[in-house]
Amino acid sequence: MAKDPQLRPLPRLIFASRWLQLPLYIGLIVAQAVYVWQFWTELVHLIEAVFGDSHALELLVHSIGYKTDAVPDKLNETILMLVVLGLIDVVMISNLLIMVIVGGYETFVSRMDLEGHPDQPEWLSHVNASVLKVKLGTAIIGISSIHLLKTFINAAAYDEKILMWQTIIHMAFLLSAMAIALADRLLPHAEKHGSHH
């Protein structure tokens, strides 16, 4: 049985400092629980509004920022679409949180030894810092797309400058993610090419 290599005191301290990230990941798990609560609250209000609860409908209209002179008598297609997009948004941000919590812990803190576990996520089997960057980039683009769609459906509630800047920011996210993905593809080739010399 191989003996663990003994680190000198300073490297051991520096290496152990990675555990300082643990409270951060626990904090993100708490944030995940808040998102679950938010999702179910919105869903309950939506179901109540479908059955004609005017107070639930009023709460939904205010939460989605729907611009109207008076709260409609019943749920309409636009409000329904905005609420559903809001729920999708919560799910996508929740997915992003899971990627950061699980992927970040596995990459930067400690191995989880999930090999062979039936519930091991497919993306986690080959996770590293660069894969995580690309995954997070694509998740942020998805979230930004949902926000943009919500904004354009409810365009009357926004100033033209806000619409323009949201579109510009979305394009910037898109270009950034493409640049990260391209760099990720080129880097291994460059390393392989360099190793032949």
Image: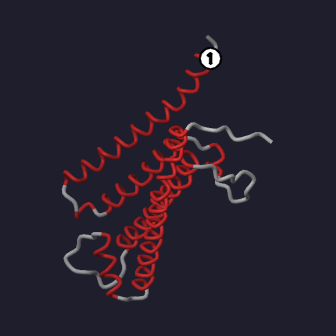
Crowd band around label 1 with a 10 angstrom C-alpha radius: few (<14), some (14–19), many (20+): few
**Residue that sits furthest to the right in the current view:** 1
| Residue 50 falls left or right of residue 68 | right
Residue 186: x, y in percent?
53, 26
In front here: 90 or 104?
A: 104
Q: Nearer the viewer, residue 162 or 33?
A: 33
State the residue lying farthest toward the top. 197
148 to the left or right of 96: left
Query: What residue is shown at x 46% (from left), y 61% (from top)?
Result: 28
Could you tell me residue 67's position as x and y percent? 24, 70
Which residue in the structure is indicated by mark 1? 195
Quadrant position of the C terminus in the picture: top right
- Asked which colour scheme the image uses, the reply is secondary structure
Q: Secondary structure at mark 1?
A: helix
Specify the farthest residue to the front: 9
Which percent across, then down, holds residue 175? 39, 37
**Picture quarter containing residue 47?**
bottom left
Vertical side of 47 occupied by 141: above or below: above
**Residue 120 in the image: x percent, y percent?**
67, 55
Task: Write the residue at 69% across / 41% down.
Answer: 4
Q: How many marks?
A: 1
Query: Quadrant of the image for the N terminus?
Result: top right
Instruction: Residue at 40%, 73% (x, y): give it.
Output: 80
Amino acid type for the residue under numbered disc 1? Ser
Residue closest to the eye, 135 or 158: 135
Write the residue at 49% across / 35% down: 181
